[in-house]
Structures are given as structure tokens and as C-alpha cells.
Amino acid sequence: MTFEALLFYFFAAVMVAASLAVVTLRNPVHCALSLVLTFFTCACLWLLLRAEFLAIALVLVYVGAVMVLFLFVVMMLDIKTLPGREGFTSYLPAGLVVATVMLAELIGLMGARKLMQGGPVRDAATEQGLSNTEWLGRALFSDYILPFEIAAVILTVAIVAAVALTLRRRPNVRTQDPAQQAATRKQDRLRLVDLPHHDGSKQA
Amino acid sequence: MVDNTVAIAISMADVRAMLPELFLLAAAFTILMADLFIAQAQRSVTHWLAIASLLLTGALVWRASGDDSLARSAFGGMYIADQVAAVCKLFILGSTLLAYVYARPHLKPRGLFQGEFYTLTLFAVIGMMLLVSAGNLLSAYLGLEMLALCSYALVALNRDSPLSSEAAMKYFVLGALASGLLLYGMSMVYGATGSLDLGGIRAMSSSNLLHPDLLVFGLVFIVVGIAFKFGAAPFHAWVPDVYQGSPTGVTLFVASAPKVAAFGMAYRLLDNGFGTPALWPNWAAMLSVLAVLSLVIGNVVAIAQTNLKRMLAYSTVSHVGFLLLGIIGGGADGFAASLFYATTYSITVVAAFGLIVLLSRAGFEAEEIDDFRGLNQRSPFHAFLMLVVMASFAGVPLFVGFLAKLQVLKAVIRADALWLAIVGGLCAVVGAFYYLRVIKVMYFDKPVADAPVLGATDAGFRLVLSGNVLALIALGIFGGPLLTWCMRAVAAS
Amino acid sequence: MDQMLSLFNTYTAQFPTIWMAIKIVLLPILPLIIAVAFYTLAERWVIGWMQVRRGPVYIGMGILQPFADTFKLLFKELLIPSKSNLFLFRLAPMLALIPAFSAWAVVPAGEGLVHSDVNAGLLYLLAMTSMGVYGIILAGWASNSKYAFLGAMRAAAQVISYEIAMGFALVGVLIAAGSLNLSEIVRAQSGNLGIGEWFMWPLLPLFVIYLISGVAETNRAPFDVAEGESEIVAGFHVEYSGSAFAIFFLAEYANMILVSFLVPLFFMGGWLSPCPESWGWIGKGGPHWLALKVGIIAFSFLWFRATFPRYRYDQIMRLGWKVFIPITIVWVMVTGVLVYTGALVPNA
């Protein structure tokens, strides 16, 4: 067993344990954190496969941004523990049967022995003498330009949809207009009033 | 030193082949921006702009389909512009156009007449056009997601209605699950063939594969994904809730054009990708199960419905069963029959919901079947229109629904699946029962005391609706040209 | 026996990997901790001087002050709120510190003076700095205190908002340099013009935005609403005492020093000399130039704190989303056009 294989088994074990924790833990914040750990170990596994761009992008996007927002929401909701899973035990046998059948089918269909004889994995990036990131960039902007641009449109649609569903112009909401605040002049706020002295004479 | 110039693979030929989509995309973005500067009182400007862009796109599709100088595939096979795509696109654009006309009087009094409705539907149309033109699993998936994302948001457009939100939530969760299954299947197929290109998959699947079973395993999940998008039983759980929960103006859209797009997707994946004689029995068997379940569940459950929108939802499930019969038949004839079914169904269902809009008004939804009691005495013409739509759904001869059913049954018989044809015929008889019940309610029941007057709609609306419904009769009698068009399109592709 | 021998051989063959790992862990940490200690001293001097106070200059110029601070914190009792989430409460300081240190693996101090000269260094940096926020939000949540929680929420939203602008600013650098490798980025700024070749000129808006976002990303004044002493006592670390607090403190200052390194590396020519190469010894690059530039940026961090009033929270969000992000997107496009027309030549 090489050092890389050791690392692989370590990360894989952590990943499986963490993903189990995601679905079994009772505290939603712990679940979300387990998901973070799952993503992180997954990124480590990808690094072992020399897919450094994907690995770092996973950490950057999912761990660094998406899960933080997720945690944000979970924490705001302030659910200390999830309610007991009603029917968990009654559904468990059926679920286990389905899962076992699926697994057996998968193994049977592909044939465990046949799987082992898969050809060597080609690494398109090293074949062309490019770094993984560079190769991905070239592929995205040449062969896959159409799906790439469609994905961009889909993201725009997601923004439009999110705004359409959440932006509410409620009446009677007090808001600030920073530009207006900054444009305030002294005359708007301050009025100088001549007050007479107690003896009736005006101030100088 | 690596060569720093990346050959960007956009040629003028690619752009010209994809011109309709690109035009509609530009139009959608323009409308998105322009709508920001349009006051609510002038919202009709958005409406007309959207209609104009649909018409122009349709003209571009029409022109491109006849222009032999254009490339039939672009972007390295990601995009395919064949005759099937052209027929699908024209009907997608047409039924969306009808949906726009019918939706306006419904959305306006309910405060839903917003620019977002138009931008989201336009983006959904682009997604559908990409889907029916997909030459690659990637572009198929992305087109599908674009359509789905817009649909989720559209269903939830009426934010203050709990029914709407519930429907959108169910739709979203189930849709995400279906997308996951579809992606899983695609990854299996990629693992088996090493190709994402549909033509490549077809070529590889007839060669000697290392894991041929893996391909079939992936195919199962792809069929499930297609079935979900169609709303075929047992993946139909979202259909009734979405039809009932979303505003009728949105149901109009969600119920019509996406069915044509779902056909396009099935055609691309099952014919272009897995259409080899060796794979056909595999997916045909899976689809047979789905078709029988859809026919039985759709027709039987629809009988128990009192809500017209819900009834139409279950009837959709049964119609999807019929549509699948044609696909099971396979080959050029089978797919042509299904294409004919999908296209005619899209304009029938849009008319049905248009009639619901016509009878609704602010604060009142003509959704219950009881709301149509004695419609004949109040408005004979509209009762007649409803009669035509229901008869067409039921498959009464002389109406287009009959012709369509006939075609798919013929296709199944040709494929030596007589039992399927018998199940289909029996279910059509069961289905006739509840369609005829609506007709009975309209013609033979007394109107209730506070029967609603007809909703306020303009003359243009009534004209378009009447034309749409009369087209169902016209196509039923003179449906030949459309049928040959479908035949020729499938044969040529 | 043969098997075991071959196993042993493979492990020793992998030994450089382990050695590298130890080096990565050990080397940046000690100098960094010392730097942080004296940075705090410098902060007191500089701010004291700017605000015309004397600062801690009574005993031995205050040199002993950092040590006094450190020992005080280390010997104080570690208080743990009774209703806190014990595991996360203890984990949070470590989660704050680990990314702050691990980011240093790819930061070059001079030509070839870098632990790990990876290709995707810039992405790695972004990923590591974006993970630092976990320490903050977990600390805030686990403390089971309203002030801490408010601080954590503010910090999380702020860090994520400014990360986008920061990322886009770096996209500009990436386009201009044609590489994600930090050493390559510095080399792309070399040339006959000296200071004129630095990216801060063609990418001036990105430079300014990156600098300001760096201040916001580290939750420093004037963007320190996450701590906001006058509003929410001390924010996310209000319940932490003793060495746990010291770790947060260390992480914050380590991040500040990191940003002080990154700004020169990305925009100010890194270890290159501001003078043209043809000027003999003064035109030669070296770590001393980088140290000088880092000093300038680190000084400006203190300068900001001494001179600017704290931004209001909604103003911070507005600046991040409505001002910085649009500007960076536009300037990324401008950079693309500059490269396309040949006004800027990436070196890859």
C-alpha cells in the first residue's frame, strides 16, 4: 500500500463517517458542520486524483460560501434539536431492503470482476502538457462553450426567480436612502431663530 | 511556453444555426431590462414585446428549417437543428403565445401581471428550445434545468397563496430528485460509453462495450427522469398539485408547451441516443409499464375529481400514457405519432385552461366542475367551445384528439404490442366518462342561483380562443397535412 | 519479509512528502507568532502617535509589552459558559487559526522562497481565506450569547460579501498575469520600467478594492462591526478568555499580515525592485523589497484604524454589493480588452 493509498483510505473513511453524521445527528448545526467536513474530505480525495481545480473550487464555493450561508440560516432558525424522526424505525427495514437490492443490482450488473479490469485512466491535461486548471479552462471555452454559456443564463434565471419570489415592496416600511442622507445640507436641518432677550431687545 | 491563443470554437455557421435561440435570448434580456423602466400601468408593453419576440422567433425557426444552407448541427454536435426540432419549437412558441393571450386577463386582476411572468416564461421557452435541440447529454440536462427552474418560480408566483407555495415546494423537491436521478443515469451512461454526445453514445452502444449492462442501468434512470418531466405515473405526484396550486395563467403555460418539450427530450435521448435495435426492447419495456400505469391511474383517479383543474391534471397523466404508447412503438412512425399527439395536445390543453380563464373573474375562480353548471343557458357559444375541447380530450371522432389517439394506437399495434393497444382503448372509454360528465353538467344541469357571469375579457381574447378551439375541429377533419408534416420531420431527422 | 521490505521502501520513498508537510506546518508559524506579537506593539505605538497619546513606551520602549500580554493571556483562567456547546466552543478558535496559517504555504517571500510552488496557488489562497469565517460563526453560535451571535452573523455576511469583490479583483490579476501561480504573478510584473510594470497601474480600481476588501475580510476597522465594542461588546469572542481569546487574536493578526503580503505580491511587484533592472544593485529584486512593501501595507492597516470612524452595517453591505462588485466586474472586462488588444501581455 502506498502513502497515497493510505491517504485515500483515511479521507474516504472520514468522508463516509461525516456523511453518515449528516443524516443521523439530531442538532442541525452539527449536521451542517458534518456536511462541511464531507465536502472538505471530498476535496482532499479529488486532490489525490490531481484534480486540483475541482478540489479547490469545491472548498471555495461549497465550504467557503454555500455552507456558511446554510449555517447562517440554520443558526437563525434556532432549532436546538430536530424532532424525533417519527416512523424512522418503521421505515427502516423497507429502506434497508431497497438499499441492499440496489447495491446488489449495481454490483451484479457491473460485475465486480469486470470493474477491476477497467483500462488505465487517461489524464487529458497531462497528455497535452497543461496544468489541470488550464486544461479545464481551454475545454470550457472551446468544446464546451455552449453548455458553459447556458449555465451562465441559468444562473441569471436563478437570480430573476429569486428576486421575483422574495422582493416585496411593503408599504409603510421605514428605509434609509444613503444618497439622500449624504446630500443633506446644513440649511435643511438647522434653523436659526432670533429669540428676544428678556428685556425685549434683539440680540446683536 | 504553451501557445496562449485558445481556439474559441464559435464559428459564424454555429451562430447562424442557432439564430432563433440567440434572438430569443437577446429579446428576453432586453425585456428583462426594459421591464424595469415600465410603470405598472403600462405593463401591457411588456406583454406585446414578449408576444412580438415569440412571433419573430417563430419566423426565424420557420425560415431556418427550410434553409438548406444552414448547418444541421452546431457547437461540435451540442446543438441539433433538424426537422423534429423545428416542429417542436414552432408548437412550443405557438402554445406559449396562446398562453400569453389567455393568461393576461387572469393575471391582471390578481396583481400577478408582472414583468417577471414574461421574463421567466421566455427563459423557460429558451430552455425548451435548447432541450428539443440537444445533441449532447450536457445540453439536454442544462436545457431541462432552465425550463424547470423557471417553472418552479412561476408556480410560486402567487406568493401569498399557501396552495401555490405548497405546490411549488412539492414541484421543486420532486424535480430536484428527478434531476438527480437523471444525472446519475447520465453519469452511468458516460461511464459505459465514454461519450456525452448522443450520436457518440448510439455509435458506441452498438459496438463492443466493456460494461453493456452499465448502459442499461443508466438508461433506467434516464427513463425515470423523462417520466418525471412528462408527469407519467408513478412519477405524477406533482402534477395535480401544480395544476391546481398555480395561478391559472401559469397553469396554462406549465401544462402546454413543456409537454412538447418533454417529447423532444424523449426523442433526443431515446431515439438519437439509445435508438439502436438492441436497446429498444429495454426502454420500450420500461415505458410500457409507465404507460399502462399512467393510463389506468390517470383515468380512474380523474373520475373522482370535483375540481376541474385537478381533473385536467389527472387527464394529463392519462394523455401522457397515450403519448408514451407512440414512443414505445418506436421507429419513425411511432415517434411521428407521438409528435402529432404532443403538438395537438398542447393546443387542446391551452384552450381548456383558456376557457377556465374566460369564466373566472376577480375574486372568483371557475375551477370547480359545478361552476360550469348550465353554462349552455348562460352562454351557448362558450358551452359549445368547452364541448369541443372535452370531446377532443375524450377522443370523439371528428375531433383532433381522436386522430391523435388513432395514430399512437396504430403505432403500438405495428410494434406487435396488441395488449397495450387494448389497454389504451379501454382506458380511452373510461376517460370518456368524465369528459362527458362535464358536458352533461353544462347542458343538462340547472345553473345554480348565483351563477357567475362571464369574466371581463376583450374581444381579441375571445377571438383567439374561438380560433384555437375551432382549430381542434379543423385538425380533426383535415389533420392530414400536420400528420404528414410530423411524419416527414421524423423521417428526415 | 520481502513484502515488508518493499513496504518500508515505499514509505521512505514517500518520506519527502511527510518532511514537506512538517516544513509547511513549522516554518511559517514561529516567525508569524513573533511578527504578530510585535505588530500589536507597533499598533499601539502608531495609534498612540497618531492620536497624540504616548502609548506603551515607558519601559524599554515597550519592547516587553507583547511578552507581558502573551503571558497574561496564557495564565488567565479559561472560562466556559455553562450553557455553551462545549465541543464547538473549543473547536472554533482552532478553526479560526488553521486556515490563517495554512494559507501561508503558497506565499512566496522571494524568488524561489516558497514552501509549495503550486499551480493553483491563487485559488488555494482564496479557498483558505474563505474558510476562516467558520471559526467566527461557530464561536458566536456555540457561546450561546446574543452579543456573540450578532457578531458572528455580521461577520459571516460581511466576509462572504467582500469575498466576491476580492475574488473578482483577483480574476483581473489572473488575466493580467496569465497564471494562478503566485511566483509567476510576481514575475509577470517585472520589466524595464520597474515600478511602472506593476499591476497596480493598469488594475488600479482592482488594487484599491482588493486593499479595502482585505481590510473588511479581516474584520478590521473601519469595518469591524463584527466586534463593534460600542454596540455588541466585543462580538463573536465576547465569551472567550485567556488562551482561547489569544488564539482568535493571533488568527486575526495573522490574517492581517497575510493580506499585507498578498497586496504587494498581486499588485506591487512582490519582491521586485521599484527601480528599473538596469540600475544595478538597486534595481535587483529581493526579499527586502517585499518586506518594505509589506511594512507599508501593514502600517496602513493601523493608519485606517486610527483615522476612520466605524462604518454602519448597512453601509458596509451597500459598499460591498452595490459599489465594489459592479466596479470589479467592469474592470475585469477592461483587463480582458487590454490583454486582447495587446496593451497588457500575460507571460504564460
Image (cartoon, coloured by chain):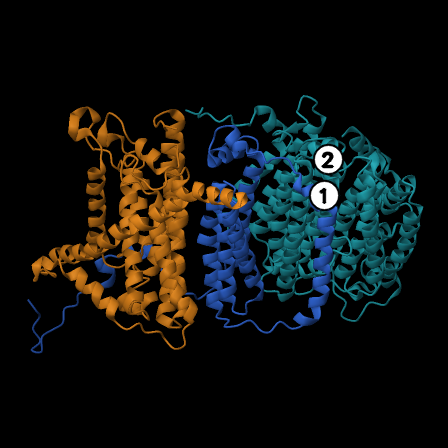
Chain colours: A blue, B cyan, C orange
- On residue B214, the disc is 1
Quadrant of residue A178 within the rendered picture: bottom left
Quadrant of residue C95 within the rendered picture: bottom left
Mark pair 2, 1: CA separation: 10 Å
Q: Secondary structure at mark 2?
A: loop
Q: For mark 1, does the 10 Å Cα neighbourhood hold few (<14), some (14 to 19), or many (20 or more) residues? A: many
Q: Amino acid at mark 1?
A: Leu
What subunit carries mark 2? Answer: B
Residue that appears at 23% across and 27% down:
C193
Q: Nearer the viewer, residue C274 or B66?
A: C274
Q: Tell me which numbered mark, 2 or 1, is placed earlier along the sequence.
A: 2
Q: Residue furthest top?
A: B69
Quadrant of residue B177 within the rendered picture: bottom right
Residue that appears at 32% across and 49% down:
C213
Q: Secondary structure at mark 1?
A: helix
B464 w.r.t. C61: above or below:
above
The spot of residue B107 in percent (x, y) is 63, 56
Q: Nearer the viewer, residue C37 or C301?
A: C37
